[in-house]
Image (cartoon, rainbow, N blue to C red):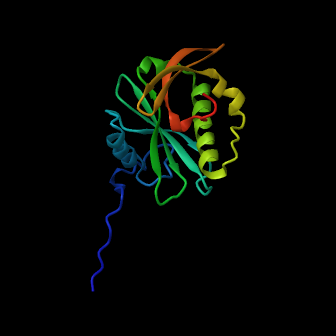
Amino acid sequence: METVKEKPKYSLEYNNCVMSDPSRMPAATNLIRMARDEHCIASENWPNLILTFGYHEDKYYAEAWGDGMDWNKTVWILEAISWDSPKPIPAIVFRHITECDKINTYDFTSLLKAICFHRRDRFVFKTGDEGVYNDVIWPLLKPTGAKEKCFSEFVFEHNSQTPLTLFINDNCIPPDRF
């Protein structure tokens, strides 16, 4: 009797293995491409790896990827709680690339780490601890009250950061914080 193999959920044909910082996620770029369709987020640029969070053998491992149009930017969190089903979620949307250009590298990296730290605690540890990000990142975000789908608009600013506007996925921020 002949067995029929199930078709995989994602194809390895789009796995980008020639990057300077290779992804640990199988078919990461294809997962993001499929998520774009699911969330109706357009992009004309190929996703690129921005940040890794955690260790790939931990209970939670995440990577931040960026793509978008020439005039805006989307940041995706591709996370693996189970390696069988890594999941991309749109985390941050900069409506205009000028807003993305305003954020300094340290703050951007800290914001991405805060999001990953929050999601790791929410799905794995469940302690409610936001770590150093309670004092470092979350107080710098001021909600404007504007919402679009599952995103809330924030103004991010502090003494050495000019004000900028960005949308953050509601599932990426501590719910009791805003």
Residue 141 screen position, x and y as percent:
60, 23
Q: Is residue 70 above or below residue 88?
A: above
Q: Quadrant of residue 105?
A: top right
Nearest the eye: 51 or 85: 85
Farthest residue to the left: give it. 2
**Number of labelled discs?**
0
Nearest the eye: 64 or 14: 64
Q: Quadrant of residue 43?
A: top left
Farthest residue to the bottom: give it. 1
Residue 148 screen position, x and y as percent:
41, 27
Q: Is residue 54 left or right of residue 78?
A: right
Nearest the eye: 52 or 143: 143
Q: Quadrant of the C terminus?
A: top right
Q: Residue at x 46, y 42 (%)?
A: 89
Q: Is residue 154 left or right of residue 30?
A: right
Q: Is residue 51 left or right of residue 3?
A: right
Q: Quadrant of the N terminus?
A: bottom left
Q: Quadrant of residue 177?
A: top right
Residue 35 screen position, x and y as percent:
37, 44
Q: Residue at x 50, y 20 (%)?
A: 145
Residue 142 screen position, x and y as percent:
58, 20
Q: Residue at x 61, y 56 (%)?
A: 59
Q: Is residue 106 left or right of residue 25?
A: right
Q: Is residue 49 above or below residue 148?
A: below
